Image: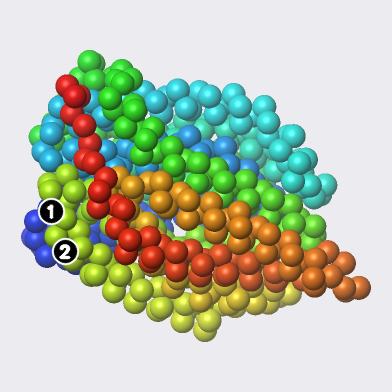
Amino acid sequence: MSKLSNLFAAQDMTEGTPWKKIVSFAIPLLIGNIAQQLYNTADSVIVGKFVGDLALAAVGGCGPLINLLIVLFVGISTGAGIMVAQYFGARRKEDLSGAVGTCMMLTLIASLFMMVVGTMISEPMLRLVDTPAETFDMCLSYLRIYFLSIAGMGFYNILAGILRGMGDSISALKYLIVAALLNIALDLLFVAKFGMAVQGVAIATAIAQFISAMLSAKKLFSMRDVMHLEKRHFKIHKVYASQLIRLGLPSGLAQAVMSCSALVVQSLTNSFGATFVACNTIVMRVDGFVMMPNFSFGNAMTTYTGQNIGAGRIDRVEQGVKDGLKLIIGTATAIVAVIVVFGPVLMGFFTDTQSLIDMATQMMRIVAPGYIAFAVTQSLSGVMRGAGDTTTPMWISFFTTLVVRVPLAYLLAYLTRSAENPNGDPRVIFFSLLCSWTVGCIINVLAYRRGKWRTKAKMKRVEE
């Protein structure tokens, strides 16, 4: 029982065997990430089964636009996680409290901003990416409800990032499981029973995210042994805000570029018709689960590196990288094998249309080997970010997205035009993704070995 409780507890990653610390932190994080993915997956499964393939395409088609408009939260979450990890590792309680208070105030401002902007530009953005006419109204309804309730999503993601920075991956796990189960139940109630279609899915997700945010906030206020949040901490302090911008802005910009490119690629995807959009939605939902170990180990490496950098233990960081790479590559290889063997079964969860299952399986198998390359990228990017070097991963992301993925997708589409496929072969969407992941892996390995991340300074004290 004690071993189990140690696994599901806040982790001080500056002591103990590196690989054991990484695994014990990553396992609850992985389960939590899977629960997070259940939000969108439950939406897709339920609307696909109870409403139809067009509703499935509508929910999936909203993804790139949502990702573009939440870059503020991505930046705040990334910067918050790194700051918290380093302050926690250095045992600087007052700085930790001030940083958390600043992050929460910035999250409030970002939520209000996105609530207004997101609802205003949803319609023109959907038109900009040539959303199919048969799914346009459903996409618009989903987006407007999503952005009106975006505060729950924003606060949960930032607060969960703060908890993980302190090594507490179990709290985020518990709250996500509660929210995911609630989301599924509400999806079934609103969609299957009340016939609310995509509007019901959006409302269910909003309620579930709000609950998870409230639970996360309650947990933070109770952690008085680690930090003591008081009224004076809830202001935007210049030192913490500037560090948050320095650390989070590159990640936010990288997310913005990737999201913009996704919108550009989504426009190409839409040109292949509603059936392929539905296929792409299925693949991306499965992809969301497949990516979870990569993201979990990547986040674990960020927290592990941040805490040890804060404690001045660069030797532990280097050993952790060796252990982490072995773990993440092995896990990714096993997942690829499952995709190749059981692809049709996985796709069958989302639709009963056999032609759609066959198409999605083919696309998933094209991109499958790239998950191993992406595993390496996530691990090494996590190390660099945890050390405070968020700019190098940003530039790598820019290159693989703007120079490799987007141009390659359109070039291959142009070269494969035919009477049967006047807009090109739809498979190019996934061939280009595979190529960009492979190139990104190679560049990340070179960047890590170059060692710029070792020279980054630790977080400043408030009095500095």
Q: Which mark is residue 376?
A: none
Between 19 and 346, the one nearer to me in the picture: 19
Label 2: how many Cα within 10 Å (few below 14, some 14–19, many 20+): many
Label 1: how many Cα within 10 Å (few below 14, some 14–19, many 20+): some
- Residue 49 on image: x %, y %: 65, 60
Rendered residue at 69%/63% (across/down): 409
Q: Which residue is mark 1?
A: 313
Q: Which quadrant of the structure image shows residue 424?
A: bottom right
Report the amino acid beneath label 1: Arg
Quadrant containing the C terminus in the rendered view: top left
Q: Which residue is mark 2?
A: 18
Report the amino acid beneath label 2: Pro
- Residue 195 on image: x %, y %: 67, 45
Quadrant containing the N terminus in the rendered view: bottom left
Q: Can you say whether 165 is above or below 238 in the image?
A: below
Rendered residue at 64%/38% (across/down): 143
Asked whether, in this view, residue 279 is left or right of residue 153, the answer is right
- Residue 108 on image: x %, y %: 42, 24
Secondary element type, mark 2:
helix
Residue 459 makes an appearance in the image: yes
The answer to whether the residue labelled 2 contacts the one labelled 1, judged by CB atoms less than 8 Å apart, is: no
Q: Can you say whether 194 is above or below 371 in the image?
A: above
| Distance between the alpha carbons at the discs numbered 2 and 1 | 12 Å
Rendered residue at 55%/43% (across/down): 256
Extreme-top residue of the structure:
232
Secondary element type, mark 1:
loop
Q: How many marks?
A: 2
Rendered residue at 41%/62% (across/down): 444
- Residue 252 on image: x %, y %: 47, 40
Extreme-bottom residue of the structure:
341
| Closer mark to the observer between disc 2 and disc 1 | 1
Return the disc, 2 or 1, that comes first in the chain's sequence.
Answer: 2
